[in-house]
Amino acid sequence: MKTLLWWGRFDPAYSRNGILRQLAYDLDYQIIDFHPVFSSAANIEASIRGIARPDLVWVPCFRQRDILAASRWAHSRGIPVIFDPLISAWDKQVFERKKFDINSIPAHKLLKQEQKQFQSADTVIADTEEHARFFSQSFHIKPENIKVIHVGADESLFQPDKQHITDPNKIEILFYGSFINLQGPQTIIEAAKICKDNSIHWHLLGNGPLLEHCKVLAGKQSNITFEDWVEYSALPVRIQQADILLGVFGSSEKAGRVIPNKVYQAMACARPVITRASNAYAADLKDGSQSGLFQIKENNPQALLDAVMALANNHNSLPEYGHKSRASYERYFSSNIIKNELYDAVSGTLTMPIPNPH
């Protein structure tokens, strides 16, 4: 039995972590957790505590602060390291939040820092092929040292509901999220405002930086409803109550590299999904009539409305599109697919030569 040491101040309940940990158990990997007091000195803490030697160290998503210490400790013992960042802090601060100009000193410093962090791992995990290319080009990682593991959905929760029946007089469109620019909730509001069909109801669930702006933008539109966030365990039921699910519509480059959680989850629940076009999806998912995943131009309210109306006007086909959506999920993103991707990443890393510690 191979032992994976999950290293860092991470949240084991976060969906990405939870899915991978369960699949690791399914592969008969043993998981040991190490949550250091201080990320930067964690290698010293691990040495003092006498952490048992694992076969591999895994640094999970968002834990850039943990990767350098983890690599120092692991490589001094000939142990390989996998880093699953999920996002780039440099990309987020410079291109998504626009906190720093790309040519500024803070941006340059952040880029150099993240290059060092990514390069310290033996294998870097990306969630899509587009993200893999971005990591390789931005952080000078050899393509063969990057493995793709899709995010997927927790299939113990997100499953089809065969009892749902669409009411043609009240078709419900559902978006849920954290109301950030990448998701483009403003596009949804603008599409709802120009929608003249009273049978279509737009629901936006969640909270985040753009929520109040979206409420102001919506005004007193009777066809737009804002809902408070629900517990994660209740999310599948909420998805199953809707007829059409919405993904993301932001125009940033990052928005075009990712497949968001909500898309995986909605497809797992067998709901037709409308989202922005992205090369992150396989080529044969481009045709929504065959895949159940309808891709439109980003940041385009009219394109979103047109896609919604096309589905609403053909509401008898919504169950069929939902079935195709689930079939697409099974083909590309199911737990079996992700389990194989995880096995490939771990087994490949275990056979790599480990660099000598400096």
Image (spheres, rainbow, N blue to C red):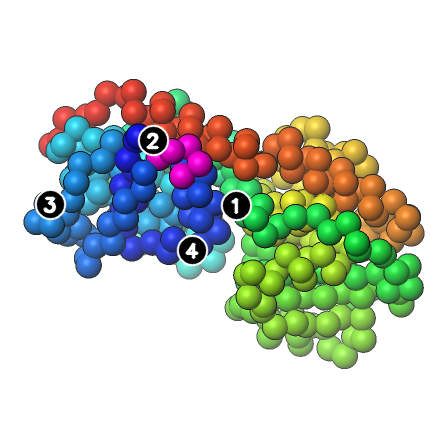
Magenta range is 25-29
- Residue where numbered disc 1 is placed: 254
Location of residue 245 (image quadrant): bottom right
Q: CA distance from mark 1 to mark 3?
A: 40 Å
- Secondary element at image label 1: helix
Q: Earlier in the sequence, mark 2 or mark 1?
A: 2
Mark 3 or 2, which is nearer the eye? Answer: 3
Label 3: which residue?
50
Front of the two marks 2 and 1: 2
Q: Nearer the viewer, mark 1 or mark 3?
A: 3
The kind of secondary structure the magenta stretch mainly shows is loop
Left or right of 139 on screen, residue 289: right
> Dot 2 surroundings within 10 Å: few (below 14), some, or many (20 or more)?
many
Question: Element under label 2?
Answer: strand
Residue toward you, 119 or 313: 313
- What is the spatial separation of the Cα atoms under label 2 and label 4, in whole angstroms? 23 Å
Residue at the far left in the pictured view: 48
Look at mark 2 in the image and give the residue it sits on.
123
Whole-number angstrom distance, CA of label 1 to CA of label 4: 24 Å
- Looking at the picture, which amino acid does disc 2 mark? Thr
Of label 1 and label 3, which has the lower sequence position? 3
Image coordinates of residue 163 in percent, x first then y, are 79, 54
- The amino acid type found where label 4 is placed reads Ala
